[in-house]
Structures are given as C-alpha cells and as structure tokens.
Image (cartoon, rainbow, N blue to C red):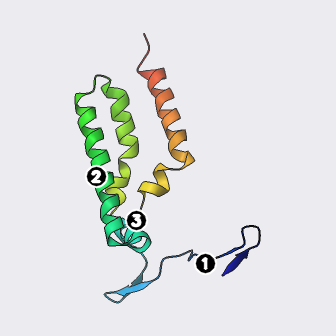
Amino acid sequence: MRSCMWIKKNIDNIDMFLPFVKFNGIDTNVYTAEWRYVRAFGVIGMAAIMWLLGAFYSIYYNWLKYSSNKITALLLYATISYPLFLSSIDERFFLDLFGTTIIYMGVCIWGTKKLLLDRN
C-alpha cells in the first residue's frame, strides 16, 4: 500500500499487467473486454456497461441510417466503431475513445473532409 500524505489515505497498489493463465499448455494474459468489466464492476456492472454500449451504438447507427449529412456521420461512426471489433481481444472502448487520440483523429478527419469533399 502506498501512502498519500496529502489526502491522508492509503491507496492499494494496482497491477500493471493482467495475471497469466495456462490455456491448453500456453501461458497467456489476453482477456476479453468483459473480463475487465467483471473484475472492476462485477457481473451486474459488466452487463450494465455492455447494455449501455450496445444502446449507444444502436441509436447512433439508426440515426446514421436516416441522417441527411451522411458523410460526416459515417466518418464519425467509422472512427468510433473499431472497439466493437476489438472487444474480443481486449477492452478498447474506454482506453481509446476517452483519450486525446480520438480528438486528434476527429479533427484530422473533419479537416480532410472539408478539404477534399466540401469544395464548392
């Protein structure tokens, strides 16, 4: 335990790496996104997070389907949908979508769209 004198509380040490397990004779520490959510929030918390993520992507997809500005909406959906495909390997929703990289990517995609597609 580390001591944080300025807040007068002890903080538990956090494991930097996921624990290794033996699977068919191979040592591995690759987990799905669900395992991290279960470890952090329990089974009910994992179900709630997965439901919220599913609802968000479903609502956004349906909005995209009927949107009048399809190019911008499609570019944004393409930018934020890749964690759906990577969730079987590792948790990417909160690691990638709530960082500064996504803002940088959004600005670059918006600028490229303005430069290449919105020339009138």
SS class of the residue under badge 2? Answer: helix
Amino acid type shown at disc 1? Asp
**Disc on the earlier residue, 1 or 3:** 1
Residue 63 in which image quadrant: top left
SS class of the residue under badge 3? Answer: loop
Q: Is residue 75 above or below residue 18?
A: above
Q: Which residue is at the far bottom?
A: 25
Closer to the eye: label 2 or 1: 1
Instruction: Say which quadrant the C terminus sits in.
Output: top left
- Mark 2 closeness class: few <14, some 14–19, many ≥20 residues within 10 Å: few
Q: Is residue 92 above or below residue 79?
A: below
Amino acid type shown at disc 2? Gly
Q: Which residue is mark 2?
A: 54
Query: Which of these two is toward me, 36 or 27?
Result: 36
Query: Which of these two is toward me, 96 or 40?
Result: 40
Q: CA distance from mark 2 to mark 1?
A: 32 Å
**Disc on the earlier residue, 2 or 1:** 1
**Disc on the earlier residue, 3 or 2:** 2
> Which percent across, then down, holds residue 11?
64, 75
Q: CA distance from mark 1 to mark 3?
A: 24 Å
> Which percent across, then down, holds residue 48?
32, 60
User: Which residue appears at 32% of the width and 55% of the height?
Assistant: 85
Instruction: Say which quadrant the N terminus sits in.
Output: bottom right
Q: Which residue is mark 3?
A: 90
Q: Which residue is mark 1?
A: 12
Closer to the eye: label 1 or 3: 1
